[in-house]
Image: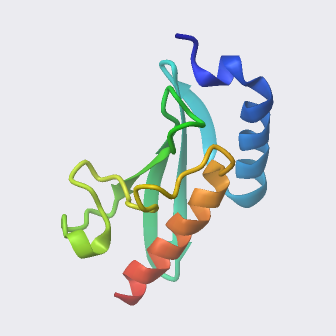
Amino acid sequence: MTVWYRRLPQRLEAELSLLRATSKAVPRLDGETLVADEEIAIGTYRFGYRIAFPEDFPYSPPTFRLRYPALPNVRELHIFSDGSLCLLGPDEWSPRLTAASLRSRAVLWCHCIVAF
């Protein structure tokens, strides 16, 4: 199966353009997987995360995996055991959504953690 960004070059350009416009994320290829790393600063707090686009994107959402700081694996924090953030309910993803739209939820999540 051909990776999504080769099948859908217009979608790749749209995703990269939106990420560049809304974040400091640095997209790159990790093998065949498109990933983007970013740090979000909220006051003195720093949150590093990696966006990873699945092979079947846009039919499955990208994952946002927290790289730092280390936080407890507490369900109320909406962090899965692999460190990825729960940003959507099970049926909320749609191929019309973008990584940039999920990134806005990740930023909101970071603000909630700081307030928590």
Give the x, y percent position of residue 54: 48, 33
Q: Based on the displayed image, in which of its 4 quarters is residue 40 positioned? A: bottom right
User: Could you tell whether 60 is left or right of 13 in the image?
Assistant: left
Q: Is residue 111 above or below residue 12?
A: below
Q: Based on the displayed image, in which of its 4 quarters is residue 69 positioned? A: bottom left
Furthest residue to the bottom?
Answer: 115
Numbered marks: total: 0
Q: Residue at x 61, y 66 (%)?
A: 104
Residue 71 or residue 105, whichever sits in front: 105
Give the x, y percent position of residue 20: 75, 49
Q: Is residue 107 above or below residue 59?
A: below
Q: Residue at x 45, y 62 (%)?
A: 87
Q: Residue at x 52, y 59 (%)?
A: 39
Residue 97 or residue 100, whichever sits in front: 97
Colouring: rainbow
Give the x, y percent position of residue 53: 52, 36
Q: Residue at x 78, y 34 (%)?
A: 13
Q: Is residue 97 above or below residue 95?
A: below
Residue 107 or residue 41, whichever sits in front: 107
Q: Based on the displayed image, in which of its 4 quarters is residue 70 positioned? A: bottom left
Furthest residue to the top?
Answer: 1
Locate the C terminus and report the quarter of the image it occupies.
bottom left
Furthest residue to the front?
Answer: 91
Q: Is residue 15 above or below residue 4?
A: below
